[in-house]
Image (cartoon, rainbow, N blue to C red):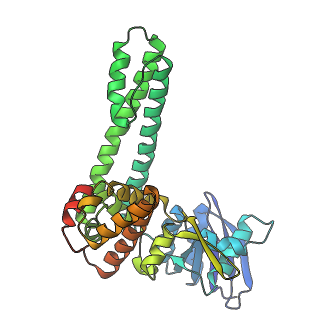
Amino acid sequence: MSISMIGLDTAKSVFQVHGVDAAGKAVIRRKIRRSDLVAFFEKQEACMVVMEACGAAHHWGRTLTGLGHNVKLIAPEAVKPFRKKGKKNDAADAAAICIAAVRPEVKFVPIKNLAKQGTLALHTARSLLVKQKTMLANTMRGLATEFGLTMPKGIQNVDDLMTQVDADESLPEEARQASKELYDHFSAANLCIEALETKIVHHARHDETARRIATIPGVGPITASLIVATVADISAFKSARHFAAWLGLVPRQYSTGGKTRLGRITKTGNSEIRKSLVVGATVMIRYAGQWNSTAGAWFRGVLERRPVRLATVALANKMARIAWALMTRKEVYQAKGRVAVAARAAA
């Protein structure tokens, strides 16, 4: 009984193992507790181990690779079609992983190293705190409105709102206390965000690939750091279009009878990178008039013909393609004209 491939369905405490031989016949099906997993694979001969890609899968990928196994990660959406209908359980998932892994069109996800996952942890924490900061500001604005105090839109106006709360003697003590607690949380979140951004910018300034990406107009150090930390191997994408498609920045296709209709963008893949690129493209609207290059002229032309949001998404798509080219060719962004002015302004 020789095992050539093992499909491993990961979990918090209990893992499901599905091993097959060279002919694809199942030779082992069993559950293994987390504490026994390493010991199990230490006893196994070196083989291919396939898991669905997730945060924990990168940890186990590094661990099992160290034991001599050939570890592959596969996207969950690639496994779903091979799961038996009506059988959503760990055993069925592990079996489906083995079936999906041998398909000729399958694409595996590179395993991230500790450094990249550490940087991603900074981005994850920052993203959560930014959301919480916005929620706190909106809650403070809503509570103040109930007592006749208003605040203009913009998170930068929270300090002025708190000044109004402190100065309004008619405000009930309970409402004043609630606003103060929210403001304290808001201030603490702001300090944490600044500390995280300092670390992220430091990574962007000292990583060679991130410095290249940051030369693209509209891409700052935070976006550059996020791309580098997320993309473990740029060679996994055959072309710039494949990279943009992975980020969900290409239109959906509806084809029938030889006719193709394009819809909204797919929004698949990494939402944080996609959002950062769109925000950077939105900032470039302000500098479109002084963006003296071929790309700048193209962007101004799109703005004249299309709605602003569509134009910014189109520019985000172009920025993603340029990022792929710079990472693949190990070059910095160069354009005709005085594009450096716009690039510095966006950074």
Q: Quadrant of the N terminus?
A: bottom right
**Residue 190 seen:** yes
**At which x and y percent is residue 336?**
22, 74
Q: Name the outermost residue toward the bottom.
A: 23
- Name above or below for residue 74 compared with residue 218: below
Q: Name the outermost residue toward the front.
A: 304
Q: Is residue 42 left or right of residue 158?
A: right
Q: Name the outermost residue toward the right.
A: 86
Residue at 60 percent across and 57 percent down: it is 12
**At which x and y percent is residue 169?**
38, 8
Q: Name the outermost residue toward the top.
A: 170
Question: Foreground: 113 or 80?
Answer: 80
Q: Quadrant of the C terminus?
A: bottom left
**At which x and y percent is residue 262?**
58, 70
Question: Foreground: 255 or 323?
Answer: 255
Name which quarter of the figure residue 118 lies in. bottom left
**Residue 203 seen:** no
Question: Foreground: 34 or 145?
Answer: 145
Name which quarter of the figure residue 343 lies in. bottom left
- Name above or below for residue 94 compared with residue 181: below
Residue at 43 percent across and 56 percent down: it is 308
Q: Is residue 183 left or right of residue 210?
A: right
- Name above or below for residue 103 compared with residue 188: below
Residue at 40 percent across and 32 percent down: it is 185
**At which x and y percent is residue 273?**
43, 61
- Name above or below for residue 328 compared with residue 13: below
Image mark count: 0
